[in-house]
Amino acid sequence: MLYRIADLTDWQQALQTSFFVSADLAADGFIHGSEMGQVLETARRYYAGRTDMLLLEIDEATLAQAGVRVAREWVAARGEAFAHVFGPIPLAAITRHFAFQPGPDGQFSLPDGVE
């Protein structure tokens, strides 16, 4: 499974169009994704203080069946490879979604059920 921290407005648009897209697809040519073990550091670095977020769980096999390419690419600033999704994500590939907000201490934690 891949994970994407998503703006609530992008998710609401996906429910209307049946495809999840975000600004990074137009800006970078791909949608940034994470492995489960990368989610919390990504949230800490880029989403501090945000309360309008969801965590999307994405089935990579369903993306492949839909012809959407995923590549792990090295991100030097983080010192590890991240999943990049090269196209809109069909809703059928999103297996679950979770509210994703920081706790009272401002820190994120994985939602219950994400293992």
Image (cartoon, rainbow, N blue to C red):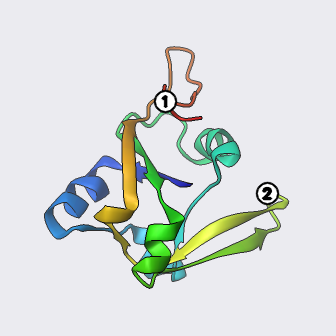
Q: Position of residue 16 (x, y in %)?
A: 14, 63
Q: What's the amino acid at mark 1? A: Gly
The reply to whether dot 2 and dot 1 touch (C-beta < 8 Å) is no
Q: Position of residue 66 (x, y in %)?
A: 39, 80
Tell which of 115 and 52 is nearer to you: 115
The C terminus: image quadrant: top right
Instruction: Tell me the residue at 22%/67% (across/down).
Output: 18
Q: Is residue 87 left or right of residue 109?
A: left
Q: Is residue 74 left or right of residue 86?
A: right
- Element type at mark 2: loop
Q: Is residue 98 left or right of residue 103?
A: left
Closer to the observer: label 2 or label 1?
1
Q: Position of residue 50 (x, y in %)?
A: 44, 37
Q: Quadrant of residue 40?
A: top right
Instruction: Tell me the residue at 62%/44% (across/down).
Output: 39
Q: Which mark is residue 14?
A: none
Tell which of 74 and 98 is nearer to you: 98
